[in-house]
């Protein structure tokens, strides 16, 4: 069995990810942003919970609480994922992606400015490559 080169897999994932925002724009014709955000992540949550039950894993209470709070803030209350879908309803896919992936750059700049976090060459290089 031959191995698929990492570069090929990376290009496939990048291509797949690049198609999601135009597809999201099409999906928004048929559904409001909040239900769409919920229905896009709900299957993954159900699969993960089912897998955990099949493996008979004991649910770690603190992890489940963290996951619940994260889901509440990120999806249900439109903080991250829901906001990105809501933005897609009003902006073009290209502008939405640009704003979304500018976030790590802005967080780094704000941390340097307000929190006086040092910016090393490694951090600057990483943020430049990421941008």
Image: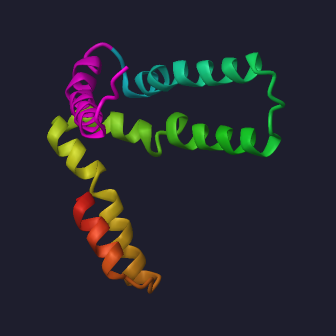
Does 62 sit left or right of 107 as displayed? right
Q: Which residues are magenta?
A: 1-30
Q: Nearer the viewer, residue 61 or 113?
A: 61
Q: Residue 118, relative to residue 25: is it above or below?
A: below
Residue depicted at 36% across the width and 82% down the height: 120
Does 126 sit left or right of 39 as displayed? left
Does 100 sit left or right of 34 as displayed? left
Q: Residue 82, relative to residue 45: is it above or below?
A: below
User: Which corner quadrant holds the N terminus?
Assistant: top left
Q: Is residue 13 magenta?
A: yes
Q: Position of residue 88 (x, y in %)?
A: 26, 34
Residue depicted at 28% across the width and 18% down the height: 27
User: Which corner quadrant holds the C terminus?
Assistant: bottom left
Q: Is residue 9 magenta?
A: yes
Q: Position of residue 64 (x, y in %)?
A: 73, 38
Q: How is the image coloured?
A: rainbow
Seen as rendered, the residue at the extreme front is 1
Residue depicted at 44% across the width and 86% down the height: 116
Seen as rendered, the residue at the extreme top is 30
Q: Position of residue 96 (x, y in %)?
A: 23, 43
């Amino acid at each position: 069995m031959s191995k698929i080169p990492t570069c090929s897999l990376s290009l496939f994932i990048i291509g797949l990810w690049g198609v999601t925002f135009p597809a999201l724009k099409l999906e928004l014709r048929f559904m409001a942003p909040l239900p769409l955000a919920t229905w896009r992540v709900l299957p993954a949550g159900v699969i993960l919970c089912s897998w955990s039950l099949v493996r008979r894993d004991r649910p770690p209470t603190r992890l489940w609480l963290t996951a619940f709070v994260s889901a509440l803030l990120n999806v249900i209350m439109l903080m991250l994922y829901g906001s990105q879908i809501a933005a897609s309803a009003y902006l073009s896919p290209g502008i939405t992606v640009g704003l979304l992936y500018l976030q790590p750059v802005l967080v780094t700049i704000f941390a340097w400015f307000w929190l006086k976090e040092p910016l090393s060459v490694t951090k600057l290089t990483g943020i430049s490559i990421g941008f």
